[in-house]
Image (tube, rainbow, N blue to C red):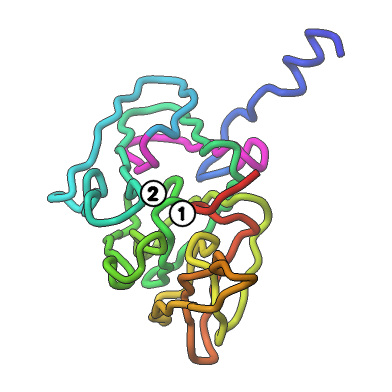
Amino acid sequence: MELSEFTRSNAPTEGGEGFRTENNRLLSVPVDGTVTIKAGSMIAYTGEMTFTGKSSAEGGLTGFVKDAVTSEGTPVMEAEGSGRLYVADQGKKVRILDLDADESISVNGTDVLAFESDVDYEIDTIGDISEVAAGGLTNVYLTGPGQVALSTHGDPVVMTPPVVTDPDATVAWSTDLSPSFATNKAFEIGQTSGEGIQMQFTGSTGFVVVQPYEEGGQHP
């Protein structure tokens, strides 16, 4: 491929409104004011922009129960200014959701990539941390109207409860569901199964999003 063709074929799309994907792993965000993004996810921007960490006292996630959960939580930062912002999360695939007014979704904090300033959010821990151990989750409850971008390892699948999932593979669920944790004490060939903590979603409505990857698991 000639250099001119390479630069032309991989140039970002100009103009446009709202969140969009430049490719399936890169989110493009037009900024005219503020937008909230996952800390460390900015890879480039045009125009004038500043980035500020959000404190937990203001509803942000930096440092929120960080010592109480096994993961690093979900620090976010606010981008403010005018221009176009490009964000990505370790090569994960980007999914854009358009939330209507009063429409909401609960997302594993690890998988929140960005959301518009009009989207209301609050955070909480899911399950009893002392019992859940590696399954302890910091979740973000996002309520529209506005756009939300999630990141997933591979292509997710959306399931209808009742369903049992691995916490490390669980991306999001509808807020009408209230998952519970259970401990699987089964043994395989004298060893634990590796699936010691499970999330249980009961009922017959709503949805659960899982990805083909375990965030906190052991991977080759």
Viewed as shown, does residue 203 lie left or right of 5? left
10 or 127, nearer to the observer: 127
Vertical arrangement, residue 50 with respect to residue 90, above or below: above
The numbered dot on residue 213 is none
The numbered dot on residue 116 is 2
Residue 218 locus on image (x, y percent) = 56, 50
- Could you tell me which residue is drawn at 57 percent across and 31 percent down? 15
Q: What segment is highlighted magenta in the picture?
A: 21-39
**Quarter assignment of residue 34:** top left
- Could you tell me which residue is drawn at 39 percent across and 69 percent down? 101
Residue 102 locus on image (x, y percent) = 37, 72
**Which residue is outermost to the top?**
3
Q: Is the magenta stretch mostly helix, strand or loop?
A: strand
Viewed as shown, does residue 59 lie left or right of 82? left
- Could you tell me which residue is drawn at 51 percent across and 82 percent down? 206
Mark 2 lies on a secondary structure that is strand
Residue under circle 1?
Answer: 147
Number of other residues with Cα within 10 Å of mark 2, as a class: few under 14, some 14 to 19, many 20 or more: many
Q: Find out whether residue 38 is within the magenta segment.
A: yes
Residue 104 locus on image (x, y percent) = 40, 69
Q: What residue type is labelled 2?
A: Glu
Q: Do the residues labelled 2 and 1 touch (CB within 8 Å)?
A: yes
Vertical arrangement, residue 56 with respect to residue 174, above or below: above
**Quarter assignment of residue 137:** bottom left
Mark 1 lies on a secondary structure that is strand
Q: What residue type is labelled 1?
A: Gln
Number of other residues with Cα within 10 Å of mark 1, as a class: few under 14, some 14 to 19, many 20 or more: many
Residue 62 locus on image (x, y percent) = 24, 44
135 or 29, nearer to the observer: 135
